Amino acid sequence: MNITDAVAFWDDVHAARTPATDPKPNARLTEAVADLPAGDALDLGCGDGGDALWLAGRGWRVTAADISSVAVERLAGLARSSGLAERITAERHDLQESFPRGRFDLICAHYLQTPAELDRAAVLRAAAHALRPGGRLLVVDHGSTAPWSWNQDPDAHYPSAREVAAGIGLDLTEWVIDRADAPRRIATGPGGRTAEVVDHVLLIRRTT
């Protein structure tokens, strides 16, 4: 799938959804970040914007990036209607071509998995280098196939958190792995359908 197709694919995915009026944050974000002091955050693949809105509501200054202009425009509207426009900057980025500018105390990448061509390791490496000393990169990936997933390939391989870390290839004298595990949870999908799913959670902290 080429870049044009990737943009069209994700625009169509978001356009087909009823616009979220109160999107919820990802569970792995709230458990990992709740006790951190607010600072500058980057949300890669912001989607409906639940993570960005949750962070901004707790005092973070958030740059929210997505390949879909539909997602970006909807999030910008939600930020205005929630009184959070001064804390959220919504930007369209195709991460194959551009990466948001700045230095961050937190970068989160939840389910940054796509059928389109994407050098994910390079994107996550760029994210790690965009951290300030003490900053954290939270990567949460699917570890199983939900019944409502767009990818129903029974042979799909979901790399473990340690495999993802190895692929990023960071110098572990400058970054440390604070968490790499595969917890389970009950997820809710379209129409209220629920299922047990596995998350692959990787939390990296920059030390210098």
Image (tube, rainbow, N blue to C red):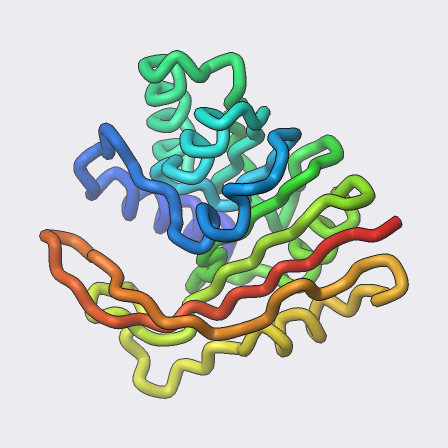
Tell me what residue is drawn at x 71 percent, y 75 percent: 166
> To which quarter of the image does residue 40 belong?
top right
Determine the residue positioned at 43% across, 71% down: 183
Is residue 1 visible in the rendered structure shown here? no
**x then y, percent, for residue 65:** 52, 37
Q: How many numbered markers are drawn?
A: 0
Q: Give how far across and how far down residue 143 sits, in percent.
A: 42, 74
* Horizontal relation, residue 60 to residue 205: left or right: left
Left or right relative to 153: residue 173: right
Q: Position of residue 144 (x, y in %)?
A: 36, 75
Q: Looking at the image, which is closer to me, 178 or 66?
A: 178
Could you tell me residue 134's position as x and y percent? Answer: 77, 45
**Residue lying farthest to the bottom in this orientation:** 155
Q: Nearer the viewer, residue 26 or 125?
A: 26
User: What residue is at 58 percent from the left and 54 percent from the top?
Assistant: 138
106 up-or-down from 119: above or below: above
Query: Left or right: 193 with respect to 100?
Result: left
At 53% from the left and 19% from the top, the residue drawn is 87
Residue extending farthest front: 35
Q: Is residue 50 visible?
A: yes
User: Does 140 appear above or below 20?
Assistant: below
Note whether 160 is above or below 69 in the view shown.
Answer: below
**Foreground: 181 or 119?**
181
Residue 191 horizontal side relative to residue 137, left or right: left
